[in-house]
Amino acid sequence: MMENLNFALIDLYSYIDYFEYGGIFAISLLAGIVTVIPIPVAPLLALAALNEQMNPHLLVLSAVAGSVAAKALIFWCSYYGRNILSVKTRTRLLPLHKFINKFGWIAVILTSATPIPDAPVNIHLGLAKYDFWKFIIAALIGKLIAYELVVFAVIFMGRSFLNDSISKINDAQLLMAGLAITISYAVIMYLTFRIDWTKVMGKRWSDPGKDV
């Protein structure tokens, strides 16, 4: 199993190595769009950072650009797809979306900088018509933190650190991670759309004309 994982990473890495910064951008973009399938951007970024021919910080910027572009695409699809929701659903979601508009940047930074699933947050931010540039800036900050930490760890700890980390991962763990991400997305999205947030959050957040 470990050999299969190594071959998969090597195949993806060869793509990055060939296209350099454009490769890491493309894979980060794809990973951000197809969020339910875990594509190992961080390990690939780490492998690419060990290549002395490449500037590690430009690699980080390429990965950040791809990830943020994917987030922006999901955001705009939700933003303009809002009218698909029924009036009843939009009314039920109003308190949640008002809360998101007030504190959404915290959620964006947190989910961008950590392995916490971010697609549900991005979708609801779009539905809530959150300020696009606040969203982008928060996403940039979160991804810069995450990817700079990856590159710093690899440069500081060295190749042996990376090899040891990868050697501890097997196909079963990757499959379980993928299933966990898919299930968590489905559960979170289902609950957020089914819960009556007007009852959960109270009148303070439910008044359409009141800016909380």
Image (cartoon, helix red, strand yellow):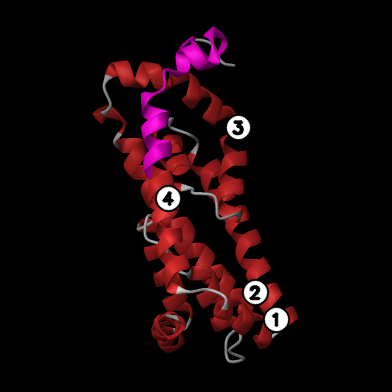
Q: Quadrant of the C terminus?
A: top right
Q: Which amino acid does label 1 sit on?
A: Ile
Position above or below: 24 against 3: above
Residue at the image position 48 percent from the left and 56 percent from the top: 68
> Could you say where residue 11 lies in the image, as x and y percent from the top left?
39, 85
Q: Which amino acid does label 2 sit on?
A: Val
Q: Name the residue under label 2.
A: 151
Q: Mark 4 points at which residue?
A: 72
Question: Given contact means CB atoms under 8 Å apart, are the residues at marks 4 and 3 in contact?
Answer: no
Residue 103 marker: 3
Residue at the image position 55 percent from the left and 55 percent from the top: 115
Q: Name the residue under label 1.
A: 155
Bounds of the magenta segment: 186-208
Instruction: Judge whether residue 39 can be spotted in this image.
Output: no
| Residue 199 on the magenta span | yes
Instruction: Judge whether residue 9 can be spotted in this image.
Output: yes
Disc number lying in front (1 or 4): 1
> Could you say where residue 35 lies in the image, as x and y percent from the top left?
39, 56
Q: What residue type is labelled 4?
A: Ala
